Amino acid sequence: MNREEACPTVRVPESMSAVVAGYVWKRDKVGESGGAVYRLHGKPGAPDLYLKHGKSAVADAIADEMARLRWLAGRLPVPAVAHFTCTVDEAWLLMTAVPGQTAYQLLLADPGQRDVVVDALAEFLKRLHAIPTSSCPFNSDHAYRLGLARSRIEAGVVDEEDFDDERAGWTAQQCGTRCRSCCRSRPIR
């Protein structure tokens, strides 16, 4: 599966235009973030870059990603933030490419590498979870995530056609109510 397609250069904010000049652009066709992801490559003597762009709630998510990448730098191998620009309703995040291949690419090339890929992912998660939560300035605990879900339900932005088979035919309100009562009865780990 070809995950990218060639595309023309995209208009970016003036503060970023000199940095992206001279690159060949490809748009990522995979993902459901609602934003656009581009791979910039082929500029002589320059590293490959990735650009994420989004508006509204996607812009907020991109700004959050930028903050988390900057915080994780030095703790884990993450892309470096090369440039970040945001306005009231739009965000652009330019990052360095991390060397290597995705798990998807490795398994596509050699499905027999499944154990190696799973072990590598497990090792990465072990490193991630070894970072002391007391030093993390971000919150994504149970109560916070449920609050975000409630806000999405109330704003009418939940795609009810995308529920799993067990919840097919439910309304977002039903799902939110049942989740809240179910989650209250379980200990938070």
Image: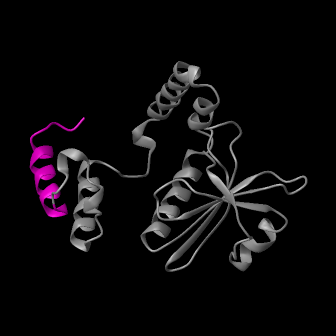
Q: Percent from the top left, x then y, of residue 72?
A: 56, 45
Position of 99 relative to 6 (above/below): above
Q: Residue 61 location, x and y as percent?
A: 46, 62
**How many numbered tags mark residues here?**
0
Most extreme residue toward the right, as rendered?
44
Magenta-colored span: 171-189
Q: Nearer the viewer, residue 136 or 58?
A: 58
Could you say which is closer to the camera, residue 159 or residue 97? 159
Q: Report whether residue 76 is seen.
A: no
Task: State whether residue 8 is above or below residue 30.
Answer: below
Q: Residue furthest front?
A: 1
- Going by the image, does 85 lie left or right of 17? left
Q: Is residue 136 above or below residue 40?
A: above
- Residue, x 9% and y 49% (percent of image)? 181
In terms of depth relative to the viewer, which is nearer, 87 or 21?
21
Q: Position of residue 44 (x, y in %)?
A: 90, 55
**In the image, is 102 to the left or to the right of 168?**
right
Q: Who's the residue at 46% across and 59% down the image? A: 33
Name the magenta segment's main secondary structure.
helix
Residue drawn at x 74%, y 70% is: 8
- On the rendered image, what quadrant is the C terminus found in? top left
Residue 32: x percent and y percent? 46, 57
Q: Residue at x 65, y 30 (%)?
A: 109
Q: How is the image coloured?
A: one colour
Residue 65 as seen in the image, left or right of residue 17: left
Magenta-span inclusion, residue 29: no
Q: Is residue 185 magenta?
A: yes
Q: Nearer the viewer, residue 68 or 181?
A: 181
Q: Is residue 167 visible?
A: yes
Name the image quarter holding the N terminus. Answer: top right
Quarter holding residue 76: top right
